[in-house]
Every structure is written in C-alpha cells, then in structure tokens.
Amino acid sequence: MFSLFGLSVGSSAAAGGDFAPPGCFGERYGILFGQGVSVSCFPGAGYGYRVIAQCASGSAYWFVAGMPVPYGFGPAVAECSGGLLVPASVAAYRVVEI
C-alpha cells in the first residue's frame, strides 16, 4: 500500500507545481500551523473548478481537495493543516475543471 501511495504522490508532485494553469490565478497564504492555496479561474468549458493541494508535513504527504466552485463565484481554496511542531505546507497544487 505504501509503494502505491508513494508512486501516486511522486507523479502528482512532478505534474503539479507552483503555477496555476492558463486562465487561472493562484496564491498561497498562511494559516495557523499550515498553508493554503486560493485559485480563481476565468470561465471554461465546464460548470466550475476545484483545487487539489498536495500537502507535506515532515515525511508525510497527503492530498486535500477543495470544494467545487462555479465559475464567477469566487476562488476555490484548499488548506493543509499540520501540528504545532510540524506545520504543513502546500508542496504542489492543481486545478480540476468539473
């Protein structure tokens, strides 16, 4: 199970990155013991979009999916929360159109 999880984390980290896709504007921000990402996109072919963040805290990696947002109704956000001694950060993020 760990090898499959590690494989999926590695491939998404390489595919993600610090930049939002064309037509979107992303910004990272700090929260208590963590970091979040906020993404706003111009209207596309679908109904809306959501942001999926890859979180890292120490040697742990996981994904946080934000709530779907219809086009024109504000940013999509995803927040990575950690602990007092090991805060979490956004290692990469991607935007998924729905």
Image (cartoon, rainbow, N blue to C red):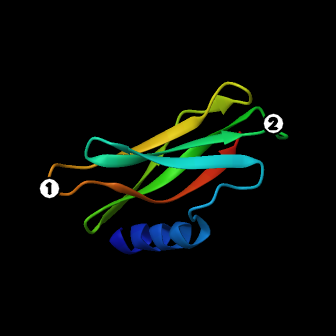
Amino acid type for the residue under numbered disc 2: Pro
Q: Residues within 10 Å of mark 2 (few under 14, many from 20)?
A: some
Q: Say whether disc 2 or disc 1 marks the residue closer to the N-terminus.
A: 2
Residue 76 horizontal side relative to residue 97, left or right: left
For label 1, the SS is loop
Residue at the far left in the pictured view? 85
Residue 81 can be seen in this image: no
Residue 11 horizontal side relative to residue 34, left or right: right
Amino acid type for the residue under numbered disc 1: Leu
Q: CA distance from mark 2 to mark 1?
A: 40 Å
Q: Is 7 or 66 nearer to us in this picture?
A: 66
Instruction: From the top left corner, tell me how far across and down residue 15 is, in percent.
Output: 61, 69
- Find disc 1 in the rendering and name its residue: 85
Residue at the far right in the pictured view? 45
Residue at point 27%, 69% (across, down): 59
Residue at point 85%, 40% (across, down): 45
Residue at point 55%, 48% (across, down): 27
Instruction: From the top left corner, tell me how far across and down residue 84 is, in percent.
Output: 15, 49
State which quarter of the image contains the C terminus: top right
Instruction: From the top left corner, tell me how far across and down residue 69 is, in percent.
Output: 64, 30
- Find disc 2 in the rendering and name its residue: 43
State which quarter of the image contains the N terminus: bottom left
Residue 54 can be seen in this image: yes
Q: Is 27 or 10 nearer to us in this picture?
A: 27
Q: Quadrant of residue 2?
A: bottom left
Q: Is residue 41 above or below residue 89?
A: above
Q: How many marks?
A: 2
For label 2, the SS is loop
Q: Is residue 60 above or below residue 32?
A: below
